[in-house]
Every structure is written in C-alpha cells, then in structure tokens.
Image (spheres, rainbow, N blue to C red):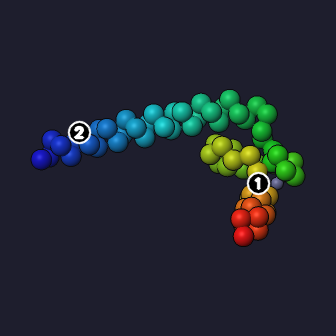
Amino acid sequence: MADDIDLANDLIDNEVSRALSRLRGQASADSKGSETCLECGDDMPKERQALGFKLCVPCAVESERRRSLFID
Ligand SMILES: [Zn+2]
C-alpha cells in the first residue's frame, strides 16, 4: 500500500517537473517578443509572461467581459 503511494508520488513529481520545465522553455522562447501586453503595450509582469498570458490583467479582464457579452 505504502509502495503504491510512493509510486504515485513519484509519478506526480515527474509530471510536475516535466510540466514546469516545459513552461520555462516556452516562457524563455516567448519572452523575446512578448514582454508587453499585445492589447495596450504595457509591461507584463514576469509571472504572467511565464504562464503564457499575452495580455495584461486589465486587458484580459476586458477581453473576458467582451467575450461574455458575445456569448450572452
Ligand atoms: Zn494591456
């Protein structure tokens, strides 16, 4: 039983570190051309860039709002 849990934890660890390194790889590749918001050109927080966002927070909220208007 304990072995199963250890195995599961190892699998999760592997998945997480793979996902993180993939994210970091994308972030470093993307950051060359997308350090600023695509919408307003404001500087993007590094944490947001690392997550792959292309819009700053206000623009993301605005685009979400517009999308929800269209859906409605
Ligand atoms: Zn913006």
| Residue identified by numbered label 2 | 7
Residue positioned 43% across, 40% down in the render:
16
Q: Secondary structure at mark 2?
A: helix
Q: Which residue, as the protein is rendered here, is positioned at the far left?
A: 1
Looking at the image, which is closer to me, 7 or 43? Answer: 7
Distance (Cα) linking label 2 and label 1: 40 Å
Q: Which residue, as the protein is rendered here, is positioned at the far right?
A: 40
Q: Provide residue 11's location: percent of width, then percent of height.
A: 31, 38
Disc 2 residue type (three-letter)? Leu
- Where 32 falls versus 39 (above or below)? above
Pointer 2 and pointer 1: residues touching (CB < 8 Å)?
Answer: no
Looking at the image, which is closer to me, 61 or 49? Answer: 61
User: CB of residue at label 1: within 8 Å of ligand 1?
Assistant: yes
Q: Residues within 10 Å of mark 1 (few under 14, many from 20)?
A: many
Q: Taking the image as drawn, is residue 49 in sight? A: yes
Q: Provide residue 56's location: percent of width, then percent of height.
A: 76, 54
User: CB of residue at label 2: within 8 Å of ligand 1?
Assistant: no
Residue positioned 62% across, 33% down in the render:
26
Along the polypeptide, which appears first: circle 2 or circle 1? 2
Residue positioned 78% across, 41% down in the render:
35
Task: Name the quadrant containing residue 34.
Answer: top right
Q: Is residue 63 left or right of residue 53?
A: right
> Where, quadrant-wise, is the C terminus in this rendering?
bottom right
Disc 1 residue type (three-letter)? Cys
Q: Secondary structure at mark 1?
A: loop
- Where 26 falls versus 47 (above or below)? above
| Residue identified by numbered label 1 | 56
